[in-house]
Amino acid sequence: MIARTPMLRAILIILAGLVTATATMAGSPFEITGVRIDAYGANVTKAREQAIRVGTLDATYQLLDRLTLPSDRLALDPPLIITEDIAEQLVAGIEIANEKRSRSRYLGDLSVTFDVQAVRNFLRAHNLPFVESQAASVLVVALWQNAKGRPVLGTDNPFAKVLERPGFQNHLVPLKFAKENLVLDDEEAALKAWRLANFDTGLLSAMATDAGVKEIIIASAKREGSNAVRIQAQRVQISETGIESIVDMGSFEGMAPFSARQSQWLAQALFAAADKIAQVLDTNWKHQAIVRDDMRQSVRLTALYNSLPEWQRLRDALGGVALVDEARLDALSYDGALLTLNYIGSEEQLARRLAQKGISLSHEDIGLVARVQ
């Protein structure tokens, strides 16, 4: 018989939180922002309706690109075709900014929030594998090469202003912008920019700790020609002992359309280049994280903890991983719980998701064990 200690009684009270459920995404990959809409109609009302329909369809295809791999889409037979009616059924809400209208024309920037469960059900019904969760955030340091070729932080950095846009956090690999770089005085900003460009271990480690990340991208942008920019990016892995590795991601070019206004071309070109970086990160994550339906597994797992807060972290992590279909409690004591875990994917994928939530998964003498890192 299990002795009912005060901590055990408290655990029993909160066990209702560990139930069979499908977890929701931690971020907002189901939101597509900045879709340009422009349509004509018999009147402005008709034009607006047409613009929203076309923009919503465009956003739906962008979402499909974000969540799935081209190879999986091409393998579908028959191919997946999304109509305006289908797109409308997947939408939870829309917002429109920068509206302009005339008697028969409507323009704006459309943001679409999709119904997470509706999208998942739609993709599963068409046997199209997709990403179930976001990766851990990556901190991005934006350096701008001035006319003298020196890296610049601070308020004279147009690249930094572009990366402040919230849409970058909606990617599968959320990009967290290092905002503190914008409030430095000129002398301090110049010194910090130089240290970052030279991969100063102490500075990068401190920034990673403050931001709660394990990766930093040092992105240095410069003008190229009259309507283009180029970003050179290095991906830095940070561990407790300092820099673990530096990977050259290569260069990314961004061009503004020739129709862009003089005051807007630089921001548009920088956004195009930065978005390419985000796409590369997303694609790499999809190759790691996409789960196939034939990878369903069931395993006995022991959750070990030393306190009620640790049990709560374990409970929330196991219930908050999208791969987990069911976490069933089989036995409980004051320092551990035995569960049956039904999940989709490989054990490596499950361990990676739990690690993002601060939970380690390991094989020990008693079997598979989860504990707070």
Image (tube, grey):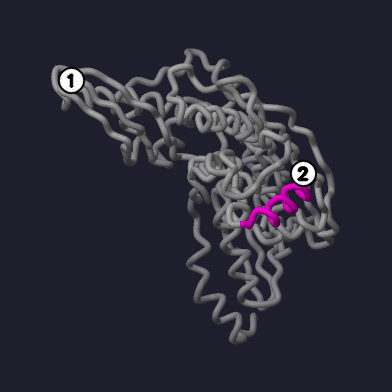
- Residue 18, x across and y down, in percent: 53, 63
Q: Vertical placement of 153 versus 112: above or below?
A: below
Q: Nearer the viewer, residue 151 or 113?
A: 151
Residue 37 placement, left or right of 337: left
SS label for mark 2: helix
Residue 293 placement, left or right of 358: left
Q: Amino acid at mark 1?
A: Ser
At 31% from the left and 22% from the top, the residue drawn is 38
Q: Are marks 2 and 1 in contact (CB under 8 Å)?
A: no
Location of residue 284 by image quarter: top right
Mark whose residue sits in front, 2 or 1:
2
Q: Main secondary structure of the magenta part?
A: helix
Q: Earlier in the sequence, mark 2 or mark 1?
A: 1
SS label for mark 1: loop
At 42% from the left and 41% from the top, the residue drawn is 117
What span is in magenta? Answer: 184-197
The verdict on residue 191 being magenta is yes
Badge 1, how many Cα within 10 Å: few under 14, some, many 20+? some
Residue 197 is labelled as: 2
Location of residue 319 by image quarter: bottom right
Q: Nearer the viewer, residue 172 or 268?
A: 268
Query: Quadrant of the image for the C terminus?
Result: bottom right
- Residue 11, x across and y down, in percent: 56, 76
Q: Amino acid at mark 2?
A: Ala
Q: Nearer the viewer, residue 1 or 303?
A: 303
Residue position for label 1: 104
At 62% from the left and 70% from the top, the residue drawn is 311
